[in-house]
Amino acid sequence: MIERPGTGGELPLSGDFNSFPVARRVNSFQAVAMDDDMEGGNLGPYQDRLRTFPNMRTKPYTPMIFRLLMRINVRVLLVLLLVGLGAIFYIGARTSPIIVFVFSICIISFLVSIYLYKWVLSKDEGPPEMAQISDAIRDGAEGFFRTQYGTISKMAVLLGLVIFSIYMFRSTNPHQESSGVGRATSAYITVAAFFLGALCSGIAGYVGMWVSVRANVRVSSAARRSAREALQIAVRAGGFSALVVVGMAVVGIAILYATFYVLLEVDTPGAMKVTELPLLLVGYGFGASFVALFAQLGGGIFTKAADVGADLVGKVEQGIPEDDPRNPAVIADLVGDNVGDCAARGADLFESIAAEIISAMILGGTMAKRCKIEDPSGFILFPLVVHSFDLVISSVGIFSIRNTRDSVVLGAIEDPMAILQKGYSVTIVLAVLTFGLSTRWMLYTEEAPSAWMNFALCGLVGIMTAYAFVLITKYYTDYKHEPVRSLALSSATGHGTNIIAGVSLGLESTALPVLVISVSIISAYWLGQTSGLVDESGSPTGGLFGTAVATMGMLSTAAYVLTMDMFGPIADNAGGIVEMSQQPESVREITDLLDAVGNTTKATTKGFAIGSAALASFLLFSAYMDEVASFANVPFNQVDIAIPEVFVGGLLGSMLIFLFSAWACSAVGRTAQEVVNEVRRQFIERPGIMDYKEKPDYSRCVSIVASASLREMIKPGALAIISPIAVGFIFRVLGYYTGQPLLGAKVVCSMLMFATVSGILMALFLNTSGGAWDNAKKYIETGVLGGKGSECHKAAVTGDTVGDPFKDTAGPSLHVLIKMLATITLVMAPIFL
């Protein structure tokens, strides 16, 4: 066995730093010679040298609900669980057998996720220094999560009171009045749905963060033995989070639907019709969107401010590697990966699925009512069935990635991206089969016997759209393809040319996705219109529902897509732990490869999220028009942008997107300046840091980004919530005095339309350019164009820092904003009339 260089001493982050080991790099011959020791997990005396890393808090944090549950006797807890399940299945059975089916699939998926959780946690955490770094990251992430979600919960309570007050004094739907659902009942239902959506979204975020801070160290440890094992652990950890998030979104809406169905005695004489029930669920989508927006903003500001500060001073000014333990901002950077990429993305996808399901249920009910379909429950509950099958097929895709011995071709490890792509291909094939089965089961009707085939084709359009988005984003962000390699080459001539090339790449990358979205919307609408479903006058009415089915098709593999998304930050954290614990170079090479693939999967899943946001926003837009028509009791099928006030509303919508993006990016910039100044101060006041003689103050950087991100997320978030309400109310008053009764609703409709179009383009530009800059840097770090530390690499680092707030703060927040604008207009529609 080859002795590791720099074995003289420990790595205390609290205590004497005189024996801090010098960062080592072993050559390829040494790396090969160590393979046998790594495979057996025996790295000799290295494991015996304990290293102490700082804890961010004095004791681990456990949420209050879990502390309360742990105090209950196990048998009592089991009885309560059985009673709860019995109650759920009872209301499900009283509602529809379809609801029982959905409940059953969700419970099975939760059991599968428990298996994945136990499997991941059964893996070893590696040597003590790895576990100590992981503990520091975990404490920092959980501490910030508690503070951030405490702030969000207070704002949610305040907004809930505002919604309740508005609903108590608003006009009511004529259909609701006739069925006995008055103002008070409607207010209580909407606020309860809002709080439940917010709670479930928060839990989804916590699950994403919880698993990532425990899986990262296990991936690091597995990388000492096998790249394939490390990949499998990261994928299954992401799979646990994905199954829980998607399952919660589905079961939450199903429980809410079934509860309202039973309590309001739907479809009984004199009661509400089942086709009107989905409108009562819009509060759930708004609550999910509200939490997701602030989670994405706060987490994005945290992670990117720490990342930019660490890179600019550490890499560019001091010339030390990424995630070097001498960098005072490195722990904050690693904490940010979990709160920004994992917690926020979990809440984000939860919100996406919830909004898509609710809007599709509203459109399905509206179409069934117009077509006088005898049993409309199939069209209303179809989205729940599709996502139930999503849980099944995504589980198969996750388990298709197995741990086999690494296949090595000419010294290269098997491409992890190819492995993930195979799993996605398996999921796609199963999605096509199950979607066809679902449409035949749920959408067959005697009024149009062949309609289900048209809707199955609509789903196929959506699935193909999702796959096209993944391929397009991969092409523009993976360094195996020409765009990123050209971007890396532009770094050879300086920082400025790198920025120019990255901006132009991002602008170009908007073209293909827009063409794909356009073709999918028109194709799905045409297939729906020709399905044979007609209203009383004989006019085709299936077009909008066809686009809804296409959106469901696009999201029919959402759980596997979220798995790939969660894989990225877990792999990134694993690389940081490997670097900080001074593992052999061959281990870092494995984690670097997984990290580069993770950057691509994060970019592709963001592209997927943008595409689904475009289709979901179109559905919510249509649902908003239906709701306005229902409350106003007049047709509301189109909006004329030639009306000056309506055109102004569109301008305001586009302006909102640019202003929101500017505030999100500037928030990262201001916070990063504080981090840069702090890191520079520590290097000046503690010169021994660079020689491993003094310890950095990691907690100071964590404290800076935590407090700043909570402060900075308020302004852009408040802008997103207040703008549509203020615009709608102001133009409602103006319309009242000018004799235009629906002016407020029309202006908000125009605002929503223009904001969606501008937001989709802006999000595509920000996400793709940021991902390309990041992977251009990774490409250079593989050794091309001078490799790490070269002038070319420094230019690429500059591009990466510019792209950081693009791809991880403003971009992801934008597609959440688009859907939140749609849900808030649905909830607040009555005050615009």
Image (cartoon, rainbow, N blue to C red):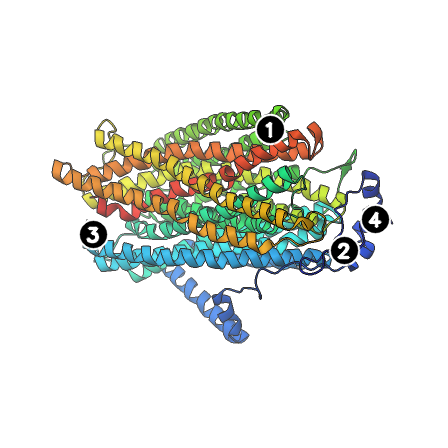
The residue most toward the right is 1
Percent position (x, y) of residue 93? 40, 60
> Would you say the residues marked 1 and 2 are in contact, meaning their CB atoms lie under 8 Å apart?
no
Of pointers 3 and 1, the one earlier in the residue sequence: 3
> What residue is at 43 percent from the left and 33 percent from the top?
762
> What residue is at 23 percent from the left and 34 percent from the top?
537
> What residue is at 50 percent from the left and 56 percent from the top?
145
Q: Which amino acid type corresponds to the residue marked 2 in the rendered image?
A: Ser
Q: Which residue is mark 4?
A: 36
Of pointers 2 and 4, the one earlier in the residue sequence: 2
Q: Which amino acid type corresponds to the residue marked 3 in the rendered image?
A: Arg
* Mark 3 nearby-residue class (10 Å; few <14, some 14–19, many ≥20): some
Q: Nearer the viewer, mark 2 or mark 3?
A: 2
Give the quarter of the image for residue 657. top left
Mark on residue 170?
Answer: 3
Q: Distance between the Cα atoms at labels 3 and 1?
A: 53 Å
Q: Front-most of 470 and 495?
A: 495
Q: Could you say whether the residue bearing mark 2 is in a helix, strand or loop?
A: loop
Q: Which residue is mark 2?
A: 19
Q: Which amino acid type corresponds to the residue marked 1 in the rendered image?
A: Val
Q: Distance between the Cα atoms at labels 2 and 4?
A: 29 Å
Q: Distance between the Cα atoms at labels 1 and 4?
A: 36 Å
